[in-house]
Image: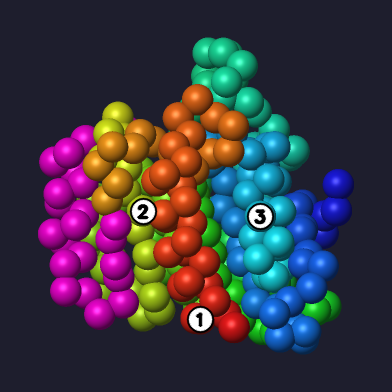
Amino acid sequence: MPETKIAARDGSGEFAAYVAKPKSTPSGGPAGAVVMIQEIFGVNGAMRQLSDWVAEMGFVAVAPDLFWRQQPGVDLDPDKGQGEWDKAFALMNGMDQGKAVEDLQAAVTAARGMEGANGKVATMGFCLGGRLAYMMAARSDADCNVSYYGVGLDGLLGEAGGIKAPLMLHIAGKDKFVPPEAQAKIVEGLRGHPKAETHVYPWADHAFSRRGGHSYDARAATIADGRSAELLTRVLG
């Protein structure tokens, strides 16, 4: 598995990141990079597949292991039963999200200087990663950020003033982890924000973009992924 090691900003060690590089780019030159932010299941097959998809579009994809402070190399499958979910929720509850943002900033910085990269970096996160992508929009120097069905975003609206780079939110209308009241609060809280845009997919469930997963929805994923691709192309080149 192609990977790199990234030093933690607090000096506590280093963590692995899966890396997928494009075979070619539309310009024929250096590529923008996308830091891929994991779900609660670690850098698993679904995250590697999504990273490979980003590389196929002509970007460098970097998916850091954000559970490394608890257990390096977590690779869980949500379709294998409750045991995988129990492990995933325990890891999520044990995560220091502030430290996770620090690790993501370290990944962004590393991605800017990677061989074949053009120095521009986005983040793209899913579920827990979607929450962290919003936090990166408010707290980091990433050039743009994309959040797929991020959880708990209604509790982060107080940080909206810190969002200085483009942020795109994809919200699943039937998301059992983000009830309708929370969805409405997010949409209304970011309405008119010059850098944030929200897209709701009323028919789709949480994890609609997880390829091969039980909630995968080809229509919602295709529309959302197209919007994401347009943003990445516009910002990263």
Residue 113, image x and y in percent? 75, 80
Q: What numbered label is drawn on residue 53? A: 3
Q: Residue 83 colored magenta?
A: no
Q: Quadrant of residue 71?
A: top right
Q: Earlier in the sequence, mark 2 or mark 1?
A: 2
**Closest to the observer: 162 or 43?**
43
Q: Is residue 10 visible?
A: no
Q: Residue furthest right?
A: 1
The amino acid marked with disc number 3 is: Trp
Q: Residue at x 47, y 51 (%)?
A: 222
Q: Nearer the viewer, mark 2 or mark 3?
A: 3
> Tag 2, which secondary structure?
strand
Q: Which residues are magenta?
A: 177-199
Q: Residue at x 54, y 76 (%)?
A: 233
Residue 159, image x and y in percent? 28, 66
The amino acid marked with disc number 2 is: His
Q: Residue furthest front?
A: 219
Q: What separation in Å lies between label 2 and label 1 (alpha carbons)?
A: 18 Å
Identify residue for label 1. Answer: 235
Q: Quadrant of residue 63?
A: bottom right
Q: Is residue 47 left or right of residue 173?
A: right
Q: Is residue 80 left or right of residue 206?
A: right
The amino acid marked with disc number 1 is: Val
Q: What separation in Å lies between label 1 and label 3 (alpha carbons)?
A: 18 Å
Identify residue for label 2. Answer: 170
Residue 134, image x and y in percent? 39, 60
Q: Residue 184 colored magenta?
A: yes
Q: Earlier in the sequence, mark 1 or mark 3?
A: 3
Q: Nearer the viewer, mark 1 or mark 3?
A: 3
